[in-house]
Every structure is written in structure tokens, then in C-alpha cells.
Image (cartoon, rainbow, N blue to C red):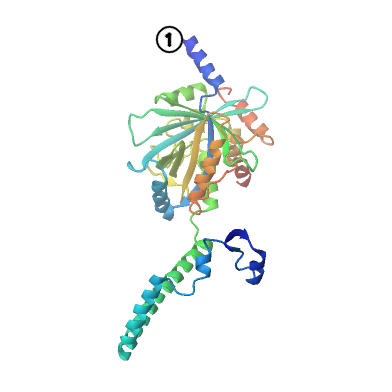
Amino acid sequence: MLSPERDEQLAQMTEHRVTTFAHDLVPDYLRTKLEPLAENKMLQLEHKAQNLQCDNAQKQIAAYQKVVSHVWDIVSKAREEWEVESSSRGNTQQNSSVADTHSLVAAVGMGKGLKLGPNPNGQPNPTSGGMMVAPQGRTGGPPGQGQIPPSTQAMTMNKAPSAIKTNIKSAAQMHPYGR
Amino acid sequence: MSTPGTAMDSLSAALKCNIIPNQEYLLQGSVLDQYVEVLLHRLRGLCDNVDSGPESFHDHELCFTLRAANTGAPMVLPLRVRRALDVNDAPFQLRYVGQQELGDKNRPTVVRSSIDMACSSTIVEFLTELGCRLDFEYIARGYMFRKGRMKITVSKIFKMGGNKPGEGVEPISQSYLVELSVLAPSGQDAIGEDMRVFAEQLRPLVQLEKIDYKRLGNMM
């Protein structure tokens, strides 16, 4: 009778719910009574329920419902908060700004906005730091140099200067030290 | 090792064996001032120096350029000098940073050559005598974190105002600059992947990205 092999007939009979008639499954399939432990428990509970007073039972049900609805409230509140938070994080909260990133990187990398911009009258720029090697040594230098806009200079620093090559060259040629 | 000849030999041998960390792998981003505490808190949790807390720094960086105009094409050689304002006897640092390579989409970070060395305070005079001109300077103040070989800096960049550093400084923007970098010998591209994973952990607080200087130059 018992066999670990697949039994086609059995499968057909049970609409493919049971495919083998094997040792490990049979006790469960053939059980007509509850498990003894469960049966015991059921009996105890039924006994208890029969002995309970009606209004006492009502009271217990009410208390139980109160607890459940309280827990339900807590859970749904938490869920609401969580959803609001996650949706706001998803679209509105901005922690960084692309423009700021670009301006900082350009400043640190190429000195954008930090240049000691030489001004046309040949005076050292009062706002420039001039901390150790201020451009004083080169003051009164070639006016041509002063006319290069700082932004142009900034670009030549790190880029292959193509169109503005001539500017740099002329400035350099007029340089008092010939550099 | 006593004579200069053998020192040169060992340097070239080291170069040949590719053990000198002269490549910098870099990702950059920023965080708005009001969220910097959140970022620092997260970095404290993610990084190695948990016990000691983040290291703070307050540096003055001077960027010099050396131009060689006598040759046909004008060559511009950038050199950076960095000195600590908060530690008096710390050595100055001289640094050369090369052109950045962005590579294709598959490369997770910017790669650029980088050579660092410690030097004394006379480096500024030395560079000036050499014909270098001060191009720009700034103050960087912030925190440094470590995670394995990775270095993370969160710094506020200030424009120099007065004649002395620390006097009349003016912040560049309402954000902190965030940089994630590793110095490694060339060819160790695997580190880029680690950096990408780490950068992912800082999102959406900071978007650490490969930033193309050339495109920034065009935008200005």
C-alpha cells in the first residue's frame, strides 16, 4: 500500500492534491481526530466557555475590542506618518544644490570667483588677498594684461586655450621679466 | 641610499614597479549648510575614525601657475601650496594635480594624476623665484573622515578678504564642498567601484559625481 512513488490514480482522484501515498504524509491524511494535544486544549476551552456568565463574557468581549481598536489606531497612525515622511523625502526635500556644487568645484579647481583680478588702472585690487605673493611686484605692468577679463583667464588655466591663445601670448611678451 | 644617484635609482625603480600612489580617484558634491550636521552624523557612522571623532582642519590654499610662453603653445603648470592655519608647526604641502580624465560612463570616478609632498614655509618664496605667479587662493575649513583607503572631506570654502588669512573671509556659497578621494598607484581601477558604493550610501543627502571641469568652464 505505502509507496514513495508517485501514484497517478491517486493524483487523479484527489484532483492533484495528493500525489504520493508515502510514510511521512499518510498519518496526516488519514487522521479523523484532532491531534491529542489540540483536542485536549479544545476541550478545556469549551468547558471554560460553557461555565462563563453571559454578562461577564460581554464585558470581556468589550475589553478585547477596545484593546484591538487601540492597537489598530496606533498602527494606522504610524503608517500615516511613515507614508507622509517617505513621500516628502521622495520629492521635495532638497539637501544639496547642483549650482552650489558647480560653483564650489569651479572655485576650488579653477579659482572661479577667487582670482586676484588685475584691474585696468594697474593698482593692486584692494579686495584681493595679496597675502604672500600679491601682484604688487607686477603692478604698473602692461596694460594689455589688465584688460583680460578674469573669466577669460580662469578658462585658460585648465583648458587648452585655443581661441584666446593670442591674448596670453601678448601679455606674456610684454611682461617685464620676459616670462 | 646615501648618494643622490642611488636615491634617483630607487625612485625610478619605485616608479617602474608602480608602487607610487600618483593617481587620484575623485568624486565631488556639496551639501547645503543646514544639512551638514546630518551628513556629518552619517559619516561618523559610516567611517573608520569613530572613536576619535572627525578630524577638523582649517587650511589656506594658494594656487600658483608656472607659464612657459617661450615655447610655441603656452604651457600652464598649476601648483598648489596648502598650509594649516590651526596647527602652527605643520609642514606646508606642495601638490601638483594633473588634467582630469573622465573616461566613459563605466568608469565610476574622475581620475587625475596627483603628486604630493611636504615642504617648509619657504616653498612660497621658492615658487615665486621660480617664476610662478599666484593665481588664486582660498581658505578651506571643515572635517576629514577616513574609510579604508578612502578620504572624505566636508569643507566650507572661503574667499580671502583681508590681508591676512582668517580676517574678513567670505564664504563662497551656502553649501559645504564634499569630496571623496583615494590616492593609489595607477591601474588600480577597482577602488573606483568601492567609491561608487560608498557614494551611494550618502544619497540623497549628497550627490557625489564626476564633475567635468571643462563643462564648468563653458558654463561660466
Q: Residue furthest front?
A: A1
Examine the image and state in which quarter residue B106 appears. top right
Residue at 44% over, 24% down: B123
Residue A130's quadrant in the figure? Answer: top left
Q: Is residue B88 above or below residue B166?
A: above
Up the image or down, A151 lies above or below A94; here it is above
| Residue at horizontal 49 percent and vertical 71 percent from the top | A31
Q: Which residue is mark 1?
A: B2
- The residue under the point 46% across, 22% down is B126
Say left or right for B210 vs B117. right
Residue A91, position in %: x, y? 54, 63
A36 relative to B77, above or below = below
Residue B43 seen in the current view: yes
Callout 1: SS: loop
Asked if residue B154 lies left or right of residue A44, the reply is: right
- Provide residue B12's location: percent of width, then percent of height: 54, 17
Q: Amino acid at mark 1?
A: Ser
Tell me where residue A44 appears, x and y as whole percent: 34, 78
Foreground residue among B86 and B108: B108
Q: Nearer the viewer, residue A26 or B58?
A: A26
Quadrant for residue B155, please give it. Answer: top left
At x 62%, y 58%, the residue is A5
Measured as percent of width and height from the top left, residue B200 is found at 52, 49
